[in-house]
């Protein structure tokens, strides 16, 4: 029996949708040589992470083992797979391997943060492979909703792992390589030990539809529309952007791309040869002078993002263009749960302008992820010894395990932080590693549980009272306490200003407080806070956050 | 020509889903006698109204005209129709009319706030009517998802208005009166001037399904389940609660209702005779001793509300009951847009416990609102001169106007604050009234635009820095400035504590500041704020909210 072991450790993406980061390792326990598959981000929201710019996986474990890290492999260029690569390059320093389009996007990110773009290496597609310590990794083209997505074939001394990345089974993807059943069957022919497999759409019971199925409906829709036609989709869905542009061209419209992300993605696709016959476009300046019935805009902001092109068009004007009665706005996209409010706001703003909005219509959008029958087909195509569901919330992983078991394949439910020993035939949990979320906020990173965001949420829910007290050299109050409020109503039950009511009760408290309290910052602060909160409760029915500042004059 | 006019003025509910409040008036311009139909609330969220308890319509216009207000008529007991009745009784003072079940709920609300429950008067169903100044108002039973919903027939000197309230066309609603086509046709027979009509589901193109259609699927599901069966639905959907309870009983399970709102609704329905044959239930204490396979819970919290029964069960334990592997949890409900995150959190928590969750399955839920074909049927049944779409966002109202026009009926798009003169045959906008949202927060009310919530959101997004400076009698700084932070990271770029970095630059600023600045609170505050924000930007890449407190010692 070998003392080496093969391990799997998700640091992100297993038990959530977003910030994918999967570690594989091989070697003696605790000294395994490691590779990391994907290093993505997830997005903050007002409910849980107000003021945060970006959420990264907590990779402390990997940082501590950085000497063992051979390389990072990125399956595709979606933010939840590539978004943290540059943010963590300083900590990890390992080379980053990706196919040309993904590498192009990753290099832009590296440059933005002042890291060497040369650390990102362009990988050729399977059957070429990249050696990384005990691993040999091949990028196998697989269909998804962004160019050059890859499933990884990871050959290890203990057998073959197939890590699908995000995928769907699409034989006519529009842009990029169709799903190649024969190729995947051949990859599975020699035996697959582990299939780590996308779980996103495991609850969708119908067969997935091809990207190409939306072309005709979109073409018809654009052809039938009269005023300006504006469509939004995920900027990275290059095939969709092309379909939309071609529909515009066919209807005799000039096509204009709006929004930085949209132009950047198309630029990267053209630079890397992924996109060769994209229709000619006009600039926003030119678009402003084209009659509206001859114009088609393709814009960013399908999720209702406040600063994106669609939200700005809905709010009035963008790049000199104003929409109006008789125009059409198409969401060629799906609203991701949690983004409904922003999307609905835009739809209503357009409604007020008289713009016809088409949203949530399946004819004009297909998912980029394998539905249940396609996940099932992947199981059967590769016939692995075990399936590890990934890229999903707990409910998705659990359902995917059930599906594997229905296929008589061992299913492993591993969430972030669970280190699984995949050696031999009986996988087992060998360690629980601390994982979590790291917030990027302005220019600093900190842990989700550090309390910073908790305090923000408390201020937002409860308002903030600031109490200032000055004590003289003899620990006697100098003047009255001073109160400021933020996020609280100015007058409450007594109709007197809240600030004055608080100052009054705090002054009373100080008068009655003995030397023992006045001398002790801790006790004094506690007393002032308690009195302020109780008084606020009486006045406005609410207990605010209270910050007390005690200034002591010294000789 | 008469100098009297008939007016319609929505103060809430037209251009949004929630806080319904529709004014009708008749009389000389500016002196119309008024009635108010519904007075509801809407619910706050972290995105737009953190810390707020409830959102009420701004009824300042009506308050100023309270002498003209004859009565308030409440169509049904959903919170978005009855929720603000007690909160505004103090301001309006008008009698409140509703049918027995709705009145029962309204009286509970009045009592909670110390108002006389006798102000709520129980109305009999049509053909009985209530006189209110120039209006004669009848409560016509109409099917919806709560007992005793009513459409109002409002007879005026200028013709008949039908105000549907929320409705669907349901011939087998389970509890309460089926939709009575003949009755509605008779009401329309004499001519209807205005149909003010529910717009919620105008985008749903398929015919609506009856409440009774979920009974068999739910019964089958409960019968097939093995462990504990728990279902959640809207507490006010008494028919659904009954269907669930009967399914439990039929499967030989003891049924237990959990959650205050659930028990209160059933109690009101029994008290008012709406519910006569509800299966026997057990108390939560009894439930805790019943084997899980013989138990069915019906619980509150279908929208993922944090403190409701479903969230507490998902978090671990509620009323002594813990769910586990093999149990089933059914959402017999629809997730309202904006609540997705809370619902998904619960589903994943149950998934971690091994509980099977059924959510978003149409077999186990039907909407309480008329789909487009049913709205269309209502137009045709009543053949009004004009349709005023209500109860909907702008997009719903606009689409509903289009539907009316397709039916060759004049459609009026009136949003909150638009006063429409309905006299004669050409309705016109005669005034724009200021409307908006009033926040109930703790024990006080204030306007949504008063800045309180704006400050909370700013603190949540940007963090809060508090700067304290003490100046002596000669306007010279006494000691160093003192800084406290909340909602900000403790150390930034320089690795020194952020507080110390800020204190350092602020001390420098004070040293360099001339007498002119030191003497002027405004200038000094502005300078300190600017320096603090700039320094924070350098350290942490973020410009926080800054509160400056300047204390001046006086002789």
Image (cartoon, coloured by chain):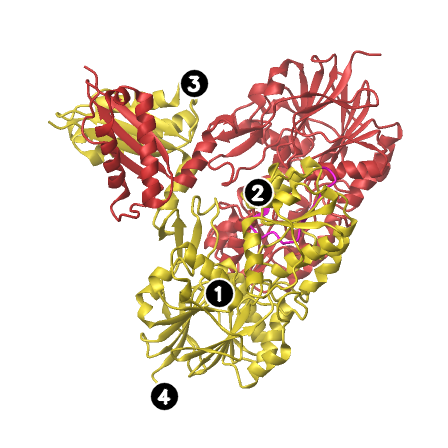
Chain colours: A red, B yellow
> Residue B199: horizontal and vertical position, in percent?
55, 66
Report, in whole angstroms, how far the alpha carbon at label 3 lies from the one at label 4.
81 Å
On screen, residue B414 versus residue A274, left or right, reads: left
**Front position among marks 4 and 1:** 1
Whether residue A183 is visible: no
Image quadrant in which you'd find residue A40: top right
Report, in whole angstroms, how far the alpha carbon at label 1 lies from the one at label 2.
59 Å
**Front position among marks 1 and 2:** 1
Whether residue B112 is visible: yes
Q: Is mark 4 on a helix, strand or loop?
A: loop
Q: Mark 3 falls within which chain? A: B
Residue beneath the point at 72% across and 42% down: B292
Q: Name the residue under label 1.
A: B103
Q: Name the residue under label 2.
A: A263
Q: Nearer the viewer, residue B435 or B211?
A: B211
> Residue B48: horizontal and vertical position, in percent?
45, 47
Whether label 2 touches label 3, CB < 8 Å: no
Indicate yes or no whether the magenta region holds residue A532.
Answer: no
Q: What element carries label 2?
A: helix
Q: Nearer the viewer, residue B110 or B17?
A: B110
């Amino acid at each position: 029996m070998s003392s080496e072991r093969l391990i799997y450790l998700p640091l992100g993406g297993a038990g959530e949708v977003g910030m994918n980061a999967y570690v594989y390792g091989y070697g003696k326990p605790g000294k395994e040589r490691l590779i990391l598959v994907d290093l993505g981000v997830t997005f903050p929201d007002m409910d849980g992470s107000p003021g945060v710019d970006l959420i990264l996986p907590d990779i402390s474990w990997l940082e501590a083992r950085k000497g063992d890290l051979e390389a990072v492999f990125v399956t595709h260029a979606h933010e939840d797979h590539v978004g943290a690569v540059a943010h963590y390059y300083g900590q990890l320093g390992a080379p980053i391997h990706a196919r040309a389009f993904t590498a192009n996007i990753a290099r832009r990110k590296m440059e933005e943060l002042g890291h060497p773009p040369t650390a990102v290496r362009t990988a050729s597609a399977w059957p070429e492979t990249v050696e990384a310590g005990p691993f040999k990794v091949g990028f196998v083209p697989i269909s998804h909703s962004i160019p050059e997505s890859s499933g990884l074939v990871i050959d290890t001394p203990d057998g073959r792992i197939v890590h699908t990345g995000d995928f769907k089974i699409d034989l006519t993807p529009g842009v990029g390589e169709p799903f190649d059943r024969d190729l995947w069957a051949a990859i599975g022919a020699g035996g697959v030990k582990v299939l780590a497999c996308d779980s996103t759409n495991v609850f969708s019971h119908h067969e997935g539809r091809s990207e190409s199925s939306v072309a005709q409906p979109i073409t018809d829709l654009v052809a039938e529309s009269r005023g300006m036609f504006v469509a939004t989709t995920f900027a990275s869905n290059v095939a969709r952007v092309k379909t939309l542009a071609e529909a515009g061209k066919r209807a005799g419209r000039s096509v204009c791309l709006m929004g930085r992300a949209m132009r950047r993605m198309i630029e990267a696709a053209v630079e890397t040869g992924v996109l060769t016959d994209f229709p000619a476009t006009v600039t926003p300046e030119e678009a402003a002078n084209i009659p509206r019935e001859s114009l088609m805009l393709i814009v960013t902001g399908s999720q209702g993002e406040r600063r994106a092109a669609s939200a700005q068009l809905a709010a009035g004007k963008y790049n000199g263009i104003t929409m109006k009665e008789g125009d059409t706005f198409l969401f060629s996209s799906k609203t991701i749960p949690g983004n409904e409010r922003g999307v609905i706001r835009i739809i209503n703003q357009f409604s007020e302008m008289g713009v016809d909005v088409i949203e949530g219509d399946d004819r004009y959008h297909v998912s980029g992820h394998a539905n249940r029958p396609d996940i099932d087909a992947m199981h059967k195509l590769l016939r692995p010894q075990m399936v590890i569901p990934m890229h999903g919330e707990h409910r998705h992983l659990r359902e995917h395990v059930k599906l594997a078991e229905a296929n008589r394949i061992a299913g492993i439910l591993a969430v972030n932080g669970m280190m699984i020993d995949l050696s031999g035939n009986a996988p087992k949990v060998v360690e629980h590693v601390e994982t979590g979320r790291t917030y990027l906020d302005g220019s600093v990173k900190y842990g989700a549980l550090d309390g910073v965001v908790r305090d923000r949420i408390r201020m937002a829910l409860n308002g903030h009272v600031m109490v200032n007290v000055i004590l003289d050299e003899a620990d006697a109050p100098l003047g009255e306490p001073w109160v400021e409020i933020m996020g609280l109503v100015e007058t409450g039950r007594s109709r007197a200003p809240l600030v004055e009511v608080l100052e009054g009760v705090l002054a009373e408290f100080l008068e009655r407080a003995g030397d023992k309290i006045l001398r002790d910052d801790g006790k004094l602060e506690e007393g002032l806070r308690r009195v302020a909160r109780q008084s606020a409760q009486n006045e406005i029915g609410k207990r605010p956050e209270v910050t007390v500042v005690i200034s002591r004059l010294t000789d």
